Amino acid sequence: MPHSTYLILHLTGLLFLALAIGGLVTSKTSDNAKTLKILHGVGLFLLLLGGFGMLARLSIGWPFPVWIFVKLFTWFVLGAFPAYQGKLKGNSDLIFAIILILTSIVMGVIKPF
């Protein structure tokens, strides 16, 4: 598949993940929790599929640059978000998720190291 297809998959996964995290943080009822968790998992899968597809198309192999490890770390932490989502005080869980997502975006766009 071309690079642009992987990019669309990656960005779609980011959109799904952000929508799911926003829904989990703002929803106080458990009516939509299952749907939001499914959306969260699909978003994580699409992020991983699109990301590694782009790495293959860009011929980036092992050893990976540091920015890829930073993106993988944020992927793992955001993957565990539903487990610790209600345990932080106030809106700190939403702020934490926003910081992680922005960090991942900066690493992917700027590729500082």
Image: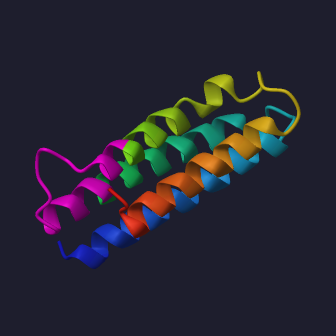
Q: Residue at x 65, y 44 (%)?
A: 97
Residue 1, given in percent of the width and then of the height, sits at 17, 72
Marks counted in the figure total 0
The answer to whether residue 50 is magenta is no
In this view, the residue in front, 88 or 11, is: 88
Residue 83: quarter of image: top right
Colour scheme of the picture: rainbow
Say above or below: 64 vs 6: above
Can residue 32 be seen here? The reply is no
User: Which residue appears farthest toward the front when viewing the image?
Assistant: 113
Residue 64, given in percent of the width and then of the height, sits at 19, 47
Residue 3, given in percent of the width and then of the height, sits at 23, 74
The answer to whether residue 65 is magenta is yes
Q: Is residue 54 left or right of residue 36?
A: left
Say above or below: 100 vs 12: above
Residue 15: quarter of image: bottom right
Residue 89, given in percent of the width and then of the height, sits at 85, 27
In this view, the residue in front, 7 or 72, is: 72
Q: Residue at x 30, y 47 (%)?
A: 66
User: For the C terminus, which image quadrant?
Assistant: bottom left
In this view, the residue in front, 80 or 73, is: 73
Q: Identify the magenta region.
A: 51-69
Residue 26: quarter of image: top right
Q: Is residue 37 left or right of residue 24?
A: left
Can residue 37 be seen here? The reply is yes
Q: Residue at x 67, y 24 (%)?
A: 84
